[in-house]
Image: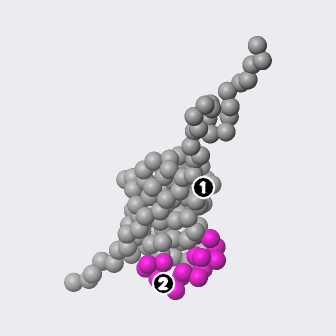
């Protein structure tokens, strides 16, 4: 009986969270139960998702099953990219240097700035009136 190899990781960006399952397979990427090309309609988001696998030449080697939650599509694409990169690193530790050099293992720390009291938003103030 063959043991099925699978690696589970989490990727985050902005408010988006991606739970990623990497399985030995033929290169399918499924996001929330549908193919990633249907989920991410913009080509730039599709490129972002595929980049770690393209750089490491593992596109035909693994299947990705992802569950995305929160944020917008761009943030979700970034979260999925980080999740896939971390999973690839677990699957093949020798890829760590390539992934690190291309910046795929670095979590983007930028978050939404909180709204302050006495203001309209994080930075915008209420309009000042003289009279």
Vertically, is 86 above or below 48?
Answer: below
- Helix, strand or loop under label 2: helix
Could you tell me residue 42's position as x and y percent? 59, 49
Vertically, is 102 above or below 74?
Answer: below
Q: Is residue 98 visible?
A: yes
Residue 110's tag is 1
Q: Name the quadrant containing residue 108.
A: bottom right
Residue 17's tag is none
Vertically, is 90 above or below 128?
Answer: below
Q: Which residue is mark 2?
A: 93
Give how far apart the Cα atoms at labels 1 and 2 are.
Answer: 27 Å
**Of residues 68 and 123, the one drawn nearer to the viewer in this rendering:** 123
Q: Residues within 10 Å of mark 1 (few under 14, many from 20)?
A: few
Q: Is 47 within the magenta?
A: no
State the residue lying farthest toward the top: 131
**Of residues 43 and 74, the one drawn nearer to the viewer in this rendering:** 74
Q: Magenta residues: mostly which secondary structure?
A: helix
Q: Residue at x 53, y 48 (%)?
A: 73
First in sequence, mark 1 or 2: give its number: 2
* Region in magenta: 89-104
**Of residues 45 and 113, the one drawn nearer to the viewer in this rendering:** 113
Q: Is 100 within the magenta?
A: yes
The quadrant of the rendering that contains the N terminus is: bottom left
Could you tell me residue 32's position as x and y percent? 39, 52
Vertically, is 17 above or below 123?
Answer: below
**Of residues 18 and 42, the one drawn nearer to the viewer in this rendering:** 18
Q: How is the image coloured?
A: one colour
Q: Residue at x 67, y 39 (%)?
A: 123
Q: Residue at x 48, y 52 (%)?
A: 16
Nearer to us of marks 1 and 2 is: 1
State the residue lying farthest toward the right: 130
Could you tell me residue 70's position as x and y percent? 45, 47
């Amino acid at each position: 009986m063959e043991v099925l190899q699978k690696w589970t990781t989490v990727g985050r960006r902005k408010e988006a969270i991606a739970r990623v399952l990497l399985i030995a397979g033929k290169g399918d990427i499924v996001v929330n139960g549908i193919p990633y090309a249907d989920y991410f309609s913009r080509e730039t988001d599709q490129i972002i998702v595929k980049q770690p696998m393209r750089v490491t030449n593992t596109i035909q080697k693994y299947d990705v099953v992802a569950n995305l939650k929160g944020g917008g599509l761009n943030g979700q694409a970034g979260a999925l990219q980080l999740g896939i990169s971390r999973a690839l690193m677990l699957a093949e530790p020798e890829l760590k240097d390539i992934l690190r050099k291309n910046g795929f293992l670095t979590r983007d720390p930028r978050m939404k700035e909180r709204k302050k009291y006495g203001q309209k938003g994080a930075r915008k103030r209420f309009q000042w009136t003289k009279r």
